[in-house]
């Protein structure tokens, strides 16, 4: 699914990544741990095509995305990747349903089909009665589940989650990570999760540790 080789990345003269290698298999859940500043989020941003490495290569599903131009990266990101962040980043003026639909509408998918799939995802994640609620009417756990639905709407091959439970209480955090396991089993998607929470990281198929810009 993913092969990243010898990734280097510098920001403002600070070398953040120092030759990172990473292989993730199809349908695997991998947790990446490490202290703040270790380079975890930077690595996730490179894998997710949100930024480019200074050197090194990234291949996803056999495609060398390191060679893509900006337009190709944008299309690949929209159609093949899903993102869940610590803060849900839902648009406050839209309902849960509308927030979930947005990535598919950007990809110019048929609105009626998109609405049906968005409803199915929200119901699958226990949000049937929250479909028409706006973000300020949702609990933290509910809002984060809406964000997960949004990440899944384009049926991505890989979902990247950056501290997805960092803004949740312990019960909601546990439920969210259990949800990732359930979705992997049901939808056969690959998850890469950056987290500080050792107990939750232990639920993954494999846990990797980063320190000082390198994979340990």
Image (spheres, rainbow, N blue to C red):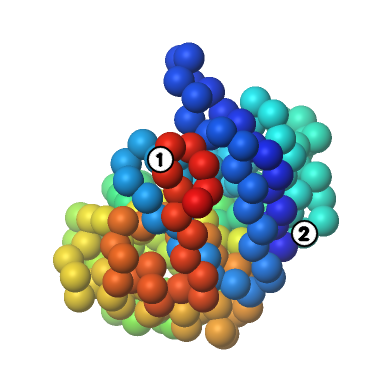
Is 93 in front, or is 59?
A: 59
Q: Kindly state the secondary structure of the residue where label 1 is placed.
A: loop
Q: Is residue 179 above or below residue 142?
A: below
Total marks in image:
2
Q: Which mark is residue 61?
A: 2
Is 139 in front, or is 210?
A: 210
* Left or right relative to 179: residue 57: right
Q: Is residue 118 above or below residue 212?
A: below
Residue at point 82%, 56% (across, down): 62
- Residue 156 in the image, given as x and y percentages of width and height: 63, 62
In primary-sequence order, the first of circles 2 and 1 is 1
Residue at point 77%, 59% (across, down): 61
User: Can residue 43 be seen in this snapshot?
Assistant: yes
Where residue 190 sits, quadrant-wise, is bottom right
Q: Nearer the viewer, mark 2 or mark 1?
A: 1
Residue at point 32%, 46% (across, down): 35
* Left or right relative to 28: residue 166: left
* Left or right relative to 169: residue 181: right
Q: Which mark is residue 38?
A: 1
- Residue 172 in the image, given as x and y percentages of width and height: 24, 72
User: Can residue 112 be seen in this snapshot?
Assistant: no
- Residue 203 in the image, given as x and y percentages of width and height: 40, 76
Q: Which mark is residue 72?
A: none
Q: Kindly state the secondary structure of the residue where label 2 is placed.
A: loop
User: How far apart are labels 2 and 1 at the CA level?
Assistant: 27 Å
> Circle 1: is it few (<14), some (14-19), or many (20+) Cα within 10 Å?
some
- Residue 65 in the image, given as x and y percentages of width and height: 75, 42
Residue at point 57%, 28% (across, down): 9
């Amino acid at each position: 699914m993913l092969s990243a080789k010898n990734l280097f990345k510098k920001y403002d003269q600070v070398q953040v990544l120092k030759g990172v290698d990473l292989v993730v298999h199809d349908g695997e859940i991998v947790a990446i741990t490490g202290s703040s500043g270790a380079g975890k989020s930077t690595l996730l941003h490179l894998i997710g095509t949100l930024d480019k490495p200074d050197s090194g290569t990234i291949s996803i599903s056999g495609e060398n995305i390191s060679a893509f131009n900006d337009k190709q990266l944008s299309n690949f990101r929209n159609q093949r990747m899903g993102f869940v962040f610590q803060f849900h980043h839902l648009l406050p003026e839209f309902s849960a349903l509308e927030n979930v639909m947005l990535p598919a509408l950007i990809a110019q998918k048929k609105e009626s089909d998109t609405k049906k799939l968005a409803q199915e995802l929200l119901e699958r994640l226990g949000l049937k009665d929250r479909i028409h609620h706006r973000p300020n009417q949702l609990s933290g756990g509910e809002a984060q589940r809406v964000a997960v639905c949004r990440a899944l709407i384009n049926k991505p091959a890989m979902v990247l989650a950056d501290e997805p439970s960092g803004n949740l209480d312990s019960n909601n955090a546990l439920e969210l990570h259990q949800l990732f396991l359930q979705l992997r089993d049901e939808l056969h998607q690959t998850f890469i999760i950056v987290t500080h929470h050792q107990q939750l990281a232990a639920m993954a198929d494999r846990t990797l540790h980063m320190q000082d810009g390198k994979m340990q």
